[in-house]
Amino acid sequence: MRGEAGHMATGMLAPVGRWRPGTEVSLALLVLALAAVFGISVPTFLSAANFVDLVESYSVTGILALGVFVVLLAGGIDISFAAIASVAQYVAATLAVTSGWPPLAVIGAGLATGVALSLVNAFLIERMAIPSIIATIATMTAYFSTLMAWTGGRAIYTLPDWWTRRIVFWRHETDGGDIVRIGLPIVLLLVIFAATHLLIGYTRAGRQLRAVGGNAEAARRIGVRIGRVQMIAYGYLGLCAALAGLLQSYRVGQAVPNAMVGSELNVVAAAVLGGASLTGGRGSAAGVMLGILLLAMLQNGLTLLSVPSFHFQTVIGAVLLLALVVISRNERRVLRGTGR
Amino acid sequence: MTETPSAGTEPSLSVSTARKGAARSLIALARPAGGTNGVLAIMILVLCAGFAAFLPHGSIGPGTLQSMMFQLPELALLSLAMSVAILSGGLNLAIIATANATALLMAVVVHALAPADGGTGGTLLAVLVAMGAGLCLAVAIGAVTGLLIASLGLNPLLVTLGTMSLIGGLSVTLTRGGVISGFPEMLLALGNTSFFYVPVSFVLLLVVFGLVAALLSRTAFGISVRMLGSNPEATKFSGVSEVRALVGVYVLSSVLCWSAGLVMMARFNSASAGYAGSYLLITILAAVLGGLNPYGGFGKIGGLLLGLVLLQLISTGFTLLGLDQHVTNVIWGVMLLVVMSARKMMSN
């Protein structure tokens, strides 16, 4: 763990918009190889219905990982997003059930809660100069424990109909009789993916984000207002977290205070697997999506092979370590200037 | 320890510097002697006085103190394991997984070797062999972690995230998520006997803290660890072997996890892959609260001990006041933020 501003040597700021092969390509090859292995051993793995299932099962994780990726890109880290997602979800559910607010107001209030809590993080990190990992560990504890003390851990089971009604955008019946549905989770994941891609690649804020993550001191000297950039990064993560919280309760049909906490490190792992450097400045939204796809395929494939679910943690650990070793070799090549 | 020049020694070259000097000496007055440790000590005293005043008479006594001393060692040893890594500029997220894995290995070995008739000699041998096996596992985990971080130049946060997942996953897989329980009295004695009111495990804790503090402040290894934490580039160029120092750091960290695992299995009379999971982030909290610089390089082990006493005091006191664990957690989190913010304002 190094200082947010302490990374002078490693911050290579690639020209924006220039596609750099590297982690994404090796990851894509890995995903294809994995698909081939699972496809041969379990024929149902390659069916469209199964593919839609596995993407949908990782939609919440994916939205969180894309949000975390933006913060990582700006050179920070966040552990509190799952707690923020839970608080936003519960606040929205309470407003909908006990206060009877209309749908749009409920969704707006949920998203606003997420953004506000995440901006508190940005304030602590920027103004109080608390390292991001320490600040978000503290706020995670504070947010989540407040939620548990307030709710007593009780779930809200009676979400209104508009909340839990299945929204299907596209439906297709295959020859085998399987029904393929593209529902709200996948569409939201794709929307956030597109938004993240546009934000970091094609906007002024995105360029500044990468600059701050690459070399905070250099960015400050060319006139980037670091506090504002941090607010954008954490605000965006807060928005993604709240959206993921609302989506999670849509998928399970209830609001459970402790349903999302505990998965933080897996989400960070997914973002890093996709090539986001923990020291900031590097990575792409496409890489994060590939990282998510890899984890989703691993879990789905192992389940179809009837491997007991407790093996999954071991596999994630092994894959993460392997990916790290491979990425480090790539990065060294890039840093030595022989990589392209 | 921070040194603040007092107004008297500041040469009053101009009005503005004199004013600055006066302001500094005001801050120096506001800052209790001894910097961070002083703040913690005062907070501990205030809390003690507060609890003494507000808790019903008779609800605190020597028994309360003793139970706090029984509870402290696991968290303290794990926090020490985390602190060693933080001091080197890293982090060890695998501490809980390592403690549980070594405890499980020791449990399996004890069960396999302990004689059925309960003979003292055979049992002692079994316990010693088990402890040796656990120690070997800890050293192996630490060495691999240190090598991955140092020789490949990987981020400690990510490497230990991976090892945490791998070690934890293997422990769950090999035990099928179950608990291994029932150990010989000899082993349990470590967790629940006292020596003149002071629990044996607490004495062990103090000895370990003393050893680690001496190792980190008085040996070449300790100095290279601090240097690595404060400026890795400069340290490399000054001829310190990064690989050797980091392998040492993570082996030390893992061995401390092993000692925590030993204390846990003695106290609970069982071992499992799922124990102490909630401690992971609290150890980071304790380390930073105790004055360790989260970026590495600076901080004292004594401060960590004070930070831990403060956390335990809050937990015990608020439990006695009838508040639930969640409220205590909120207070812990807010307190960390307040202490960090206060430090920032004092240093300005």
Image: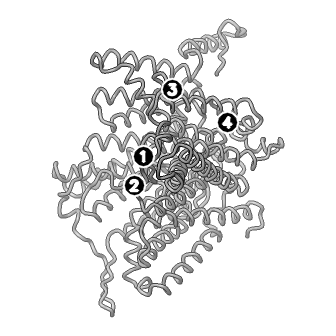
Task: Say which mark, if any, is on residue B297.
Answer: 4
- Name the residue type under label 2: Ala
Q: Residues under labels 4 and 3: Cα distance?
A: 21 Å
Q: Residue at x 30, y 21 (%)?
A: B59
Q: Secondary structure at mark 2?
A: helix
Question: Element at badge 4?
Answer: loop
Q: Nearer the viewer, mark 2 or mark 4?
A: 4
Badge 1 sits on which subunit?
A
Tell which of A181 and B260 is nearer to you: B260
Say which element carries label 1.
helix
In the visual, does B225 lie left or right of A251?
A: right
Indicate the chain on which mark 2 is placed.
A
For marks 3 and 1, give the CA distance.
Answer: 21 Å
Q: Which mark is residue A118?
A: 1
Kindly identify which residue carries mark 3: B342
- Residue at position x 62%, y 43% in the image: B85
Q: Are marks 2 and 4 in contact (CB under 8 Å)?
A: no
Classify mark 3: helix, strand or loop: helix
Q: Do discs 4 and 3 share a chain?
A: yes
